[in-house]
Image: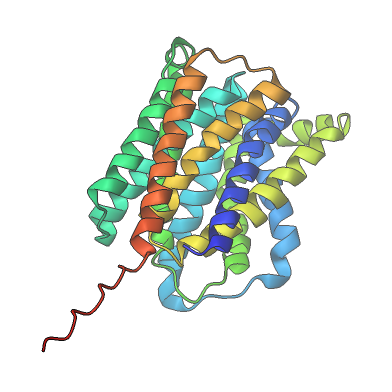
């Protein structure tokens, strides 16, 4: 992976980690599904001029991508944030998406991963488990299942994204917002009172900063950059680095949200960083050409 792509990936991890804080802040005033609809509406408003009709054979894959990576994934994870006061645990559990994506890439796309990459993923995922599977998480089984379903949906969408062709990053983002708004709006009208939620938000205008961060930062910049990378690199080369997201999210939760995780943070975070570092170093070693052997001395 080029250095510029690697730096972009790290920047995306930081943006996504901050999005857990922004979403948790927003759903205190706005109901979670309504928040998701407003978020996608802002994305669509900003990207509407870039909306282009895809070729006919891409429609099925496009709709499936948008629903799995958009409506289902975000609806479930924001709903979980609305039912839990602990941002760190949700951010950690969401990383189940990493091994799920890698497994689906092997089973569906036929990608091959070596034992070293597999080892790095397992080390990092063990770190996630150490940090995330504590009594606080197990006491919120409804939140646990919501996050796991969201992770599976996102992993499925990541695999489907590899099959999209001829659709630019921002065009996909516009379609993702448009196609996600419809089912989410119907769900919000059924389960929530969206008008009351939006009106209440005007009394707390700082919540709109969280909405803007989530829409512009996490969606347009973060997911747009991720889709751009995932179309240029194999899934198993991109997703392991996303295990940095929970570490960053926990740190941001401590600094800005008041989370107080226990000693699991140090142990689990160290394992995550060790696994990502192993994958990074291994990738660099593989790119180095073998040192040519000097020619044998001439015989006389």
Q: Is residue 37 above or below residue 136?
A: below
Identify the image's colour scheme: rainbow, by chain, secondary structure or one colour. Answer: rainbow
- Residue 4 x %, y %: 58, 62
Along the viewing direction, whichever of 157 and 105 lies nearer the viewer: 105
Residue sitting at x 60%, y 32%: 249
On screen, residue 137 versus residue 74, left or right, reads: left
Vertical arrangement, residue 131 with respect to residue 45, above or below: above
Horizontal side of residue 14 vs 243, given as left or right: right
For the point 78% across and 31% down, which residue is it? 196
Is any part of residue 17 visible from this angle? Answer: yes
**Occupied quadrant, residue 274:** top left
Q: Position of residue 146 (x, y in %)?
A: 46, 29
- Image quadrant of residue 272? top left
The residue positioned 47% from the left and 46% from the top of the image is 241
Residue 146: tell me if it is visible: no
Where residue 294 appears, x then y in whole percent? 26, 75
In the image, 190: left or right of 45? left
With 70 as the anchor, is 115 left or right in this view?
left
Q: Residue furthest front?
A: 300
Q: Is residue 99 above or below residue 87?
A: below
Q: Residue furthest bottom?
A: 300
Q: Nearer the viewer, residue 108 or 288?
A: 288
In the foreground, 108 or 256:
256
- Asked if 71 appears above or below 261 in the picture, the reply is below
Q: Position of residue 122 (x, y in %)?
A: 32, 36
């Amino acid at each position: 992976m080029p250095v510029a792509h690697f730096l972009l990936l790290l920047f995306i991890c930081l943006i996504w980690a901050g999005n857990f804080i922004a979403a948790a802040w927003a759903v205190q005033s706005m109901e979670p599904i309504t928040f998701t609809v407003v978020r996608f509406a802002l994305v669509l408003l900003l990207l509407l001029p870039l909306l282009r009709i895809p070729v006919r054979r891409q429609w099925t894959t496009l709709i499936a991508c948008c629903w799995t990576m958009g409506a289902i994934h975000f609806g479930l994870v924001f709903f979980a944030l609305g039912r839990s006061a602990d941002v760190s645990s949700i951010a950690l559990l969401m990383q189940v998406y990493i091994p799920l994506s890698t497994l689906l890439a092997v089973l569906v796309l036929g990608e091959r991963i070596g034992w070293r990459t597999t080892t790095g993923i397992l080390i990092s995922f063990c770190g996630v488990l150490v940090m995330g599977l504590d009594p606080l998480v197990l006491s919120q089984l409804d939140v646990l299942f919501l996050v796991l379903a969201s992770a599976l949906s996102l992993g499925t969408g990541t695999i489907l994204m590899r099959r999209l062709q001829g659709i630019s990053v921002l065009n996909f983002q516009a379609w993702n917002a448009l196609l996600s708004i419809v089912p989410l709006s119907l769900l919000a009208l059924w389960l929530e009172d969206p008008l009351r939620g939006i009106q209440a938000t005007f009394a707390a205008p700082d919540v709109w900063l969280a909405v803007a961060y989530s829409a512009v930062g996490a969606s347009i910049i973060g997911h747009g950059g991720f889709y751009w990378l995932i179309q240029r690199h194999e899934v198993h080369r991109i997703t392991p680095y996303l295990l940095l997201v929970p570490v960053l999210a926990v740190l941001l939760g401590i600094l800005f949200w008041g989370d107080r995780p226990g000693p699991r943070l140090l142990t689990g975070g160290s394992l995550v960083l060790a696994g990502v570092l192993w994958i990074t170093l291994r990738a660099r070693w593989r790119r180095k050409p073998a040192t040519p052997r000097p020619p044998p001395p001439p015989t006389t």
